Image (cartoon, rainbow, N blue to C red):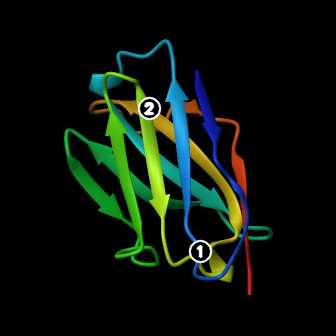
């Protein structure tokens, strides 16, 4: 089970930190990720992390940072210099190491960035 939190309404240039608490997973053996979906658009992979290796969508490189605390079984997304185009519902997800699809999803948290 994944539980995302931390979304909200902010102004352009502000920061937010999203959190995703997990339970029921052998957390250290899962790749975790953040996705987002804006109205009328397809879901987009924002960032992934496993064993310290991170990957980011080009649109967020240099502004967003994904991290995780294995002891707390929690993954974070620090979002800085937010832009109106970052407005979306953000979802955390997890997949077992080596799996092709993300099988575990959080409920989503809304991030709205005003100009």
Image location (x, y in percent) of residue 111: 70, 61
In the drawing, what numbered circle is on residue 3? none
Identify whether 35 is placed above or below 57: above
Horizontal relation, residue 42 to residue 39: left or right: left
Which of these two is toward me, 89 or 19? 19
Identify whether 114 is placed above or below 9: below
Residue pushed farthest bottom? 115
SS state under label 2: strand
Q: Give the quadrant of residue 69.
A: top left
Give neighbour class at mark 1: few <14, some 14-19, many 20+ (Cα, 10 Å): some
Identify whether 7 is placed above or below 63: above
Mark 1 vs mark 2, foreground winner is 1
Residue occupied by mark 1: 14
Image location (x, y in percent) of residue 78: 46, 58
Residue occupied by mark 2: 74
Residue at 38% x, 53% y: name it.
Answer: 66
Contact (Cβ within 8 Å) of mark 1 with mark 2? no
Q: CA distance from mark 1 to mark 2?
A: 23 Å
Horizontal relation, residue 51 to residue 39: left or right: left
Image location (x, y in percent) of residue 86: 62, 73
Q: Give the quadrant of residue 73.
A: top left
């Amino acid at each position: 089970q994944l539980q995302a939190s931390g979304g909200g309404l902010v102004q352009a240039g502000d920061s937010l930190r999203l959190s995703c608490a997990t339970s029921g997973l052998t957390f250290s053996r899962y790749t975790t990720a953040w996705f987002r979906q804006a109205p009328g658009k397809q879901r987009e992979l924002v960032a992934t992390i496993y064993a310290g290796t991170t990957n980011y969508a080009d649109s967020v490189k240099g502004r967003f940072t994904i991290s995780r605390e294995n002891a707390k079984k929690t993954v974070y997304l620090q979002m800085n210099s937010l832009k109106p185009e970052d407005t979306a519902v953000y979802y955390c997800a997890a997949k077992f190491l080596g799996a092709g699809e993300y099988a575990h999803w959080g409920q989503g948290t809304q991030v709205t960035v005003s100009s």
